[in-house]
Image (cartoon, rainbow, N blue to C red):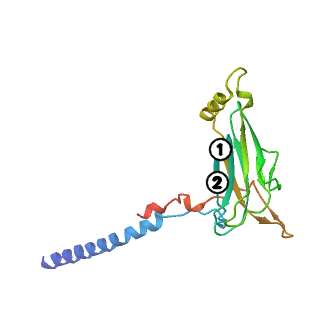
Amino acid sequence: MKIIQRYKKTFFMSAAALGMLAALTVESTMAYFTTYVSAGGSQVVNLEARTELDEDVSEMTKHIVLRNTSDRGDCFVRVRVFYGAEISVIMTDVEGNGDWYDGEDGYWYYRPILPVGGRTSQLDAFIDTTGLVKPGTDASAGIEYVKDKFNVIVVQECTPVLYDADGNPYADWDTVYTDYEEQDVQGEEAGN
């Protein structure tokens, strides 16, 4: 009887040790099988093209200047102005040197490459209120009404400078660049 009891004791101690060993490896094994990251078969390239919009408003005119705030790459920039149907906006290249031009697609393009740390020349968006002032009313009252009721929105975009086979720079406005640092990667939280 003592021999059977001794075998039982040895068996249970061996089973307990084996169970503890298995418990220690389950967590790391589960983490191995549940943590994953999906990849899409391409290389992530961070092009770092970033710009900031500086705009000032005076006498019914928005004065628009863009700055290249990236630390790595030159870029091309363009601007689009949105406004209500009740008013019109007249765009003007202030310096008149042709740096800004109407692309006839709703955008105004800055012709030179904007270097790192560089600034564009000024582009003005004049809010024309001529059609809003009713005959027989005070013109200044009409202008104050426009200032209070209408908003002109300036949207700026940038794209990195690309080069063709001959080394000529060009802008590709159709390519979508994604900032991968801000995307949520599946499976990172599974190991926590």
Q: Farthest right residue?
A: 166
Please state, as top left, top right, bottom left or bottom right, where the N terminus lies in the image.
bottom left
**Marks 2 and 1, the one that precedes in the sequence:** 2
Q: How many labels does the image show?
A: 2
Query: Is 84 or 177 nearer to us in this picture?
Result: 84
Q: In this view, does 89 lie above or below 112?
A: above
Q: Residue at x 15, y 75 (%)?
A: 5
Mark 2, other Cα within 10 Å: few <14 / some 14–19 / many ≥20? some
Q: In this view, does 144 lie above or below 28?
A: above
Question: x%, y% of residue 48?
Answer: 64, 65
Q: Which residue is drawn at 38% across and 68% down?
A: 26
Question: x%, y% of residue 187?
Answer: 49, 61
What residue is pinned by disc 2?
Answer: 53
What residue is pinned by disc 1?
Answer: 58
Q: Residue at x 46, y 68 (%)?
A: 32
Query: Is 113 or 180 nearer to us in this picture?
Result: 113
Q: What element carries label 2?
A: strand
Kind of residue indicated by mark 1: Ser
Residue depth check, mark 2 versus mark 1: number of the one nearer the observer = 1
**Is residue 11 left or right of 42 when viewed as pictured?**
left
Mark 1, other Cα within 10 Å: few <14 / some 14–19 / many ≥20? few
